Image (spheres, helix red, strand yellow):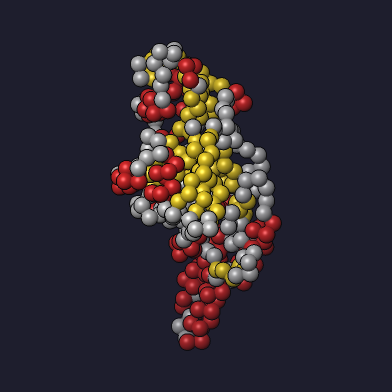
Amino acid sequence: MLVVVLMILNNNICWRTTMPGGTNPSAMAAAPSFGTAWCLRRAAKAFALSHSHILRSNANLHFQRNLCSQLLTVPTSSASGVSQTVQALKGDIDVLLKGVGDRNVTKEVKHILDMARRASLKREVLHTDFLTPPVLKESMQVLEKLADVKAIAQGGYPQAERCRISVGHPEELTSDPDIISALSITGNFQFEPCSHGDFLGSILGTGIVREKLGDIILQGEQGAQILVVPELVDFLMSTLVKVRNVPVSCSKIPLISLDYEPPRTKSFKTIEASLRVDALASAGFKISRSKLVDLISNGDVRINWITVTTKGTTLKSGDIVSVSGKGRLKVGEINSTKKGKFAVELIRYL
């Protein structure tokens, strides 16, 4: 049994995590090793089963329990010096997901964690579909806490909201994988301008699911450019023939040809008695607070892409508020006034 354990440790079967943009030495030194814990757990179980006929005395049972306990527990110290036991078990994944608030986001992040574990153990590179901004954000934050996995997020261009994550062992994931393709959708939109929703509806109408489609970049009278998974390029080129009532044609273009611009914004300040979403959003979108409350009740208001459930939710600097049919705004600098109110900078996306 000792030989098996030593072989496992010497072979360094473990799971590392590296965030996009480079390695994190402190994280790699302190992050948990899921692969090691999994192998040790299997070794302990095999030992218990193969030696069950000699583990009947109290002394032997005590030895078995101590050995299994040592094998199944892998203590690690985080950068803050807090000791933590991390294994590839449900309870440990739950610990990693504790900071994720939205239930649907938690489910998707857990799936990505499972994918990363498989990629590490099999030393292969795996890819997600296009992820929504909250799932992308939470996934990258969780992956940063692990060891022996490199994660890269790509959306096709720097400002992309919907991105795919590639995960794998650092020795396997050495460059950005070619997992995103771009299509140009052209037609005569001069007399019938089409919105983001028009393009999205027509694309989904071909039968593909939203997760296979990235951002849609509107090009005014010329049409739009879209990001998709590479395996659907030929399908869309042959099946997407109309957007609303406008005949269109699709052609593949290189990512470098994407014609995107930084979003246009307008900044202004407001004085409010509180930082509640109903107060700031009503000021930002120039609608009454009662109307904003109705929109919240209908599920039409989101903070950082997560649906708001109560009008009393407090905002902070950096939060992004989206209202269906109204657009988005970002909360900028917040200062207190002499009268106990808040001077808030609001940045409206045009």
Regarding residue 151, the answer to whether it shows in the image is yes
* Pick the front one: 287 or 217: 287
Q: Left of 280 or right of it: where is 118?
A: right
**Residue at point 54%, 52% (across, down):** 334
Regarding residue 134, the answer to whether it shows in the image is no
Q: Point out residue 270 in the picture as x, y percentages from the top left corner.
A: 48, 46
Is residue 273 shown above or below 289?
A: below
**Residue at point 48%, 29% (across, down):** 216
* Pick the front one: 184 or 14: 184
**Residue at point 58%, 57% (across, down):** 145
Is residue 288 shown above or below 337?
A: above
**Picture quadrant of residue 327:** top left
- Residue at the limit of the structure toward the front, as seen here: 339
* Pick the front one: 349 or 91: 349
- Residue at the limit of the structure toward the bottom, as seen here: 58
Q: Point out residue 152 in the picture as x, y percentages from the top left corner.
A: 59, 43
Is residue 329 shown above or below 88?
A: above
**Residue at point 54%, 28% (across, down):** 181
